[in-house]
Image (spheres, coloured by chain):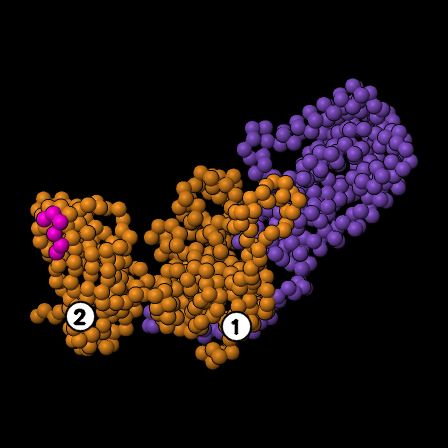
Chain colours: A purple, B orange
Amino acid sequence: MPQKPENKYSSLEGSGDFFWRVKMQKTVIEANGKNLQYWKDIWRYRRLAVNFAKRDITVRYKQTVIGLGWSVISPVINMLLLSFLFGKVADLPSDGTAPYQIMVYTGLISWNLIARGLTVASSAFISNADLLKKVYFPRIIAPVGQSLALLVDTLISLFVLFFLLFLFKYPPAYGRLIFLPVFVLLSLLLGFSAGLFLSSGNIKHRDLNQAIPFFLQVGQYVTPVVYSFAYVTAALSKKTAFLYMLNPAAGVVNAFKWCIIESNPFHWPSFLIALAWIAVLLPLGILRFRRGERTFVDLV
Amino acid sequence: MAGMAEKPIVIKAENIGKKYTLRHSRRHAVPEEGKKNGFVYRLLQPLSRQGKEDFWALKNINFEIKQGERVGIIGKNGAGKSTLLKLLSRITEPTQGRIELLGKISAMLEVGTGFNAELTGRENIYLNGAILGMTKEEIDSKFDRIVEFSEIGKFLDTPVKRYSSGMYVRLAFAVASHLDPDILIIDEVLAVGDQKFRQKCMDRMNEIALSQKTILCVSHQMNVIRELCDRVLVLQNGKLIFDGKTDEGISLYLNETKLARSEFFDLGNLDRAAVSSNTAHLESFELLNDSRRLAGEDPVMKFRIQWKSMILAKGVKLRMIIKFNDYSPVGIALSETLCDSSEGETYINSLSFDTRRLFPGVYRASLALYESDSNGKSTIFDHITDAIVFEVPELKNADKSVIYNHSYWGHTLLDNILLSD
């Protein structure tokens, strides 16, 4: 085969080899084996998550006329409608002195993060199937990236919230604002963990895909989004109130509201229940997700 | 060249296998259980009544690949080629065995994976690069080369949904081919774009091959394998049946695809493109090669065709569209006028064709029967794609110094260059 390209670097081989051996990383793939490099791999691919987030944000606003305006308009209209129904028509009390609109809008920010985090994580395999079937990267990077994009939306919503606070001349709880990032992340983490837990159940049978939107719709009303936590728990019997607090979203959303609204006292029991849920759901969710990522390529 | 023998092993596959479980829904298979096919039945027993069957897409595969080797993987559809690439590129896990990989791996299993139609060319370069495992700095440093290679020029900041399909694949290939892995895995992605760009891709691949990279490549195009690879793995029904030199592997594979070499070809019932069905019809093709030709003494192939005419036709001719056995085109041979035909008659013609300009090897030919008049008007009566297979033997008095390198030289030997005084 005289025409084959000769390896013109072969004379450098001796010296090249040495460095080559040093920097090569070794990957071992074993049947049904544990992946020892799992966390290292995720760290190595962290920038890909940022890239996915950028993609999501760019694409979402690229083809719209008012761009980012949509992430302002839709929750504001939603808030006005819900405040009218629950605050005016049903005449429910707000959290202490806070305007009803402010309370609803604050609750919606937290709830939307939970709901959308859950949606993103639970549909991670299905919505990214084309990509995951052709390229390797730690699969969790895809929903993590999509969740990062949700944080950008939340940031915009927070700006709107502060504008509303100014508009209603209602001063936020300044001393507590420092905790806001914590509660933003907790909201996302709760939704994300629950989503991860559901993700692998979503591969073979798509029933969950149908059930999740319905479940979230119901969830919004058993969570103190459009009404006051203190008012509802006081109105319920002791036993029912406890059942109500078992909903982890209740504790998280109420704590989020505490962060903004001075007259909303912190409710430890519900918050601790929520933390316990996250502490259980996150590791379980990751385990279930990892089990899903091992087989889903062969099933989807 | 002292270090040649010590090249490190970069891919080591030990006894790997991949099992799929096929689930058959029995609901359609058992019609007499009509009542049980209903919605209520499904609701009550959503997961039952499914048949399971294990299927090993790959089994007991062992091989080692050293740094800098360029290995082709060939086999029929369903032989397990893509599954093997998916295991090596970590997209799916093996059911048994162990794989050790040394170095950074990139796989091009599809051109344009992760491209987003709404994003511009520039944005997609960064996104796709990141998906394929490049860092931002790496992409920055290669950005100009990628853009230049892709030839998209002023469309760089246009959303890729407005690209022509050619521009799209060029850009996608440009990004993928500027990855800088130690091991590059390619699945049939070189067949993109027009001829000129395809050549550019091949050149780029050869360039990568020169720089100590290990390349693994799946392709159905044997000329690509021949040009790129110095070793092939042949898979058959999930098993590795050959591991060795490219040429040997390819001929094994091509024989495996049951190249029906025979003397008599019954053409009557073969599929043909729907060309004027009630005109004339080829019925058979028979090779009449005598022992002198088989011994490599006579380059002339003799054959006989039988055909039936349903119409009156003037100046009926035969043409043979010749391909090499890997389906790469060779050329066309036209017959003299066979005869004028009349309705309902069967004709038999004995013909001869000089094959001395074809390199030795196995060829296929499509046959077409047509009519052409002196004004240049022609009508095709019958056309059968890849109807026959024939072998060109090596001539006894051939110039033995010539190695028939089909992928570089094509398949024909033109007339000798003569000295003139």
Q: Amino acid at mark 1?
A: Asn
Q: Quadrant of the N terminus of chain B?
A: bottom left
Q: Residue sitting at 65 percent across and 54 percent down?
A: A292
Q: Residue sitting at 56 percent across and 72 percent down?
A: B14
In the rendered view, does B120 fall on the left or right side of A122? left
Query: Circle 1 is placed at which residue position?
Result: B62
Inspect this view and state whether residue B87 appears: no
Magenta region includes residue B346: yes
In the rendered view, does A55 fall on the left or right side of B341? right
Nearest to the observer: residue A127 or residue B259: B259
In the rendered view, does A39 fall on the left or right side of A227? left
Q: Which residues are magenta?
A: B342-347
Give the x, y percent position of residue A212.
68, 40
Task: Name the magenta segment's main secondary structure.
Answer: loop
Give the x, y percent position of residue B404.
27, 70
User: What SS does tag 1 mark?
Assistant: strand
Inspect this view and state whether residue B267 appears: yes
Q: Amino acid at mark 2?
A: Asn
Q: Residue sitting at 82 percent across and 20 percent down?
A: A91
Q: Residue sitting at 37 percent across and 60 percent down?
A: B221
Give the x, y percent position of residue A143.
65, 47
Nearest to the observer: residue B132 or residue B153: B132
Nearest to the observer: residue B365 or residue B152: B365
Q: Chain of mark 1?
A: B
Q: Nearer the viewer, mark 2 or mark 1?
A: 2
Q: Quadrant of the C terminus of chain B?
A: bottom left
Query: Circle 2 is placed at which residue position?
Result: B289
Magenta region includes residue B26: no
Q: Earlier in the sequence, mark 2 or mark 1?
A: 1
User: What SS does tag 2 mark?
Assistant: loop
Q: Which mark is residue B266?
A: none
